Image: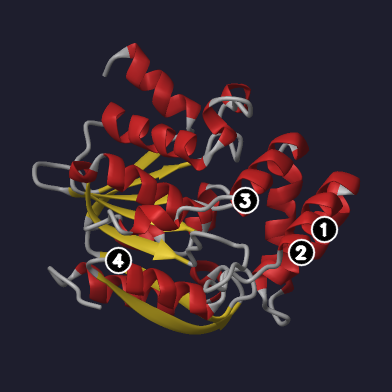
Amino acid sequence: MSSSATSILDRSNVTISGATGPGTQTIVFLHGLGGDQHDWRFIAPTYEDRYQVVLLDLIGAGQSDHSTYQPATTHATLDGHATDLLGVLSALALHDVTFVGHSVAAMIGVIAAVREPQRFAKMVLVSPSPRFINEKGYAGGFEQKDINELLAAMEADYNGWAHGFSPVMVGQQDSPELAMALTNSFVRTNPEIARHFARVTFFSDTRAELGFLTIPTLIVQSAHDVIAPLAVGHYINEQLADSRIVVIETNGHLPHLSAPQQTLSAMDHFLHHETVQN
């Protein structure tokens, strides 16, 4: 592997485990806002006997190289994060991967797959949202003023915001350990990067990309999610050419953490079928 490829992998803190050898398929996991690759701790190890498992951190999150986060240029939009993802796949010479992305990372994966479809065989979008703000004819879950207030709270007291927002994301009153783990993940993130990425995330609009995605896709949707409501999951399913949606009976925005067995069941059923239909 070249030094430039190694640099790309180091920058995104890429870790590789699981099966090896000719013909081995690869599954790639990418986390959402406030998280890191540890978010997949209940899911990724299950695939190590069948897949080469690739985990990475978004630039600016986890153990990635935070010095390479470029808020004014590369990372001013989700397109830059899609470029980072494609850079990792290129550095590893990967094609026809199964991509699993959570929340905003799901949409980063969609952007990447529209740009270089040959690198993707199947997509699993966990709690995706192409647009968080309500508009006429579209229910994203938030009014503009809600997003403005959220971002203002991050600016005023980042740690306090993290302690308040994490339980909302987790949505599990009886699982305080999940909320605390997410809070700690937020707190470990550089506040300036977290604020900027939150702004990029909540103001993003990737609805136009959906019509260009032809890769078989599974949408994993929580039944009760205030961040990406059920209507959003159904909207995405209706826009995609080859997709299905599975609704997990759980609360919150993190079904891979709050309901990992149900999430795994949905993924396994999808991955063992060649095609899906709406």
| CA distance for labels 4 and 1 | 32 Å
Q: Which residue is mark 1?
A: 149
User: Mark 3 or mark 2: which comes first in sequence?
Assistant: 2
Q: Are marks 2 and 1 in contact (CB under 8 Å)?
A: yes
Q: Which mark is residue 203?
A: 3
In depth, the one of 20 and 70 nearer the eye is: 70
2 and 4 marks in contact (CB < 8 Å): no
Whole-Å distance between the Cαs marked 2 and 1?
Answer: 5 Å
Assess disc 4: are there few (<14), some (14-19) or many (≥20) residues with their C-alpha within 10 Å of its C-alpha: many
- Residue 21 on image: x %, y %: 13, 42
Residue flagged by tag 2: what amino acid is it?
Answer: Asp
Quarter of the image with the N terminus in it: top left
The residue at the far left in this view is 22
Residue at position x 44%, y 47% in the image: 108
Do the residues under discs 4 and 3 have CB atoms within 8 angstroms?
A: no
Q: Are marks 3 and 2 in contact (CB under 8 Å)?
A: no
Q: Which mark is residue 240?
A: 4
The circle drawn on residue 146 is 2
Q: On the rendered structure, is 149 left or right of 22?
A: right
Q: Position of residue 99 (x, y in %)?
A: 32, 53
Would you call the spot at circle 2 few (<14 residues within 10 Å), some (14-19), or many (20 or more)? few
Q: How far apart in space, not on screen, are marks 1 and 3 (Cα)? A: 13 Å
Q: CA distance from mark 2 to mark 4?
A: 28 Å
Above or below, comparing residue 212 to residue 59 in the picture: below
